Image (spheres, rainbow, N blue to C red):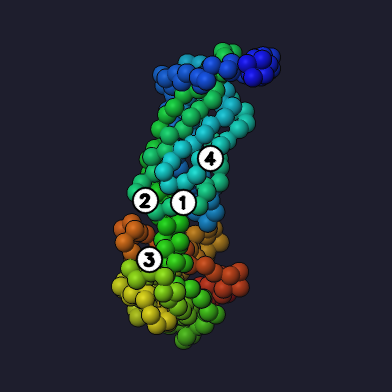
């Protein structure tokens, strides 16, 4: 047994890896002037791409080779690659956010593997705070969506247009059928977007238990403004919040109402016809 262990250790040493001492490489402090933060761009609100931004305000170049991001709200994320960051610049290292659990905030620890200039590879732990709260909001959406899925089946019907021209209103039927698995979850209402406002009569601010009978709702919207450029450049105008209330759901937690491509097209067609942009 001792001889076998020695052979394993010898092979490990030949590969240039850690010797069989049972000790991991020691972590070193992050170089002065280097800092991290986490964020998500507005263009990626519909998907799960987020990033760690590394600011290099030191006087030496950095080469990032890997990182492991650790948080109590998502499984560990591992990134590998090669990213050079000259002095006085920054770089964004993107990754897809795993499904997040319920919780509060997002304060991950990032174990960074890097080189300073032509130096040896080294590792440091640093926090990559969600400075602007964008990722925390995305995680709260995961929490809200999972919570509502546990409490009810959501079915979105076909949108219809009621009225004509500037007096028209788009109606979208939504049915929530309780599963019986939870008795603490309530529907809190639909949110407006940069393109559409919730119209009078729409369930925008409610507190409806999802316990027994199906809840049949009609979301009603009108354009928030008539602007052809806003419509042409839109990225998030059809992301309607579904507010969820529950014991383990954060304040103002919501997720985006799932819409099919034909449903989304109908919203755009309605905008054009209501505003006379055809």
* Label 4 or label 2, whichever comes before in sequence order: 4
Q: CA distance from mark 3 to mark 4?
A: 28 Å
- What residue is at 56 percent from the left and 37 percent from the top? 78
Q: Is 245 in front, or is 218?
A: 245
Would residue 65 be seen by someone viewing this image from the given angle?
Answer: yes
Q: At numbered mark 2, what does the secondary structure look like: helix, strand or loop?
A: loop
Q: Which residue is mark 3?
A: 243
Q: At numbered mark 4, what does the secondary structure look like: helix, strand or loop?
A: strand
Q: Which residue is mark 1?
A: 100
In contact (CB < 8 Å): disc 1 and disc 2: yes
Q: CA distance from mark 1 to mark 3?
A: 17 Å
Q: Is 95 in front, or is 220?
A: 95
Q: Which residue is mark 2?
A: 103
- What residue is at 44 percent from the left and 74 percent from the top? 179
In contact (CB < 8 Å): disc 4 and disc 2: no
In contact (CB < 8 Å): disc 2 and disc 3: no
Q: Position of residue 75 (x, y in %)?
A: 50, 44
- What residue is at 45 percent from the left and 57 percent from the top? 142
Q: Is 256 in front, or is 199?
A: 256
Q: How many marks?
A: 4
Left or right position of 2 against 129: right
Q: Judge whether 246 appears above or below 133 on screen.
A: below
Left or right position of 56 against 187: right
Q: Position of residue 59 (x, y in %)?
A: 47, 16
Q: Which residue is mark 4?
A: 77
């Amino acid at each position: 047994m001792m001889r076998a262990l020695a052979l394993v250790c010898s092979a490990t040493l030949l590969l240039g890896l850690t010797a069989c001492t049972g000790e991991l490489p020691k972590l070193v402090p992050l170089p002065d002037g280097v800092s991290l933060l986490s964020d998500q761009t507005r263009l990626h609100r519909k998907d799960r791409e987020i990033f760690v931004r590394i600011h290099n305000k030191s006087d030496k170049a950095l080469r990032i080779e890997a990182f492991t991001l650790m948080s109590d709200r998502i499984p560990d994320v591992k990134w590998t690659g090669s990213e050079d960051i000259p002095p006085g610049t920054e770089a964004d290292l993107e990754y897809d956010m795993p499904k997040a659990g319920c919780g509060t905030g997002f304060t991950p620890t990032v174990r960074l593997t890097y080189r300073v200039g032509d130096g040896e590879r080294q590792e440091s732990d640093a926090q990559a705070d969600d400075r602007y709260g964008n990722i925390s909001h995305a995680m709260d959406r995961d929490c809200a969506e999972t919570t509502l899925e546990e409490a009810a089946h959501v079915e979105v019907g076909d949108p219809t247009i009621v009225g004509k021209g500037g007096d028209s209103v788009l109606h979208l039927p939504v049915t929530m059928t309780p599963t019986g698995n939870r008795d603490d979850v309530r529907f809190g209402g639909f949110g407006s977007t940069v393109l559409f406002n919730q119209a009078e009569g729409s369930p925008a601010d409610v507190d409806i238990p999802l316990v027994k009978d199906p809840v049949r709702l009609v979301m009603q919207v009108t354009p928030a403004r008539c602007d052809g450029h806003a419509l042409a450049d839109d990225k998030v105008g059809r992301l309607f919040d579904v507010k969820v209330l529950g014991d383990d759901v954060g304040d103002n937690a919501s997720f985006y109402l799932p819409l099919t491509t034909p449903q989304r097209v109908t919203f755009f067609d309605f905008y054009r016809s209501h505003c006379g942009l055809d």
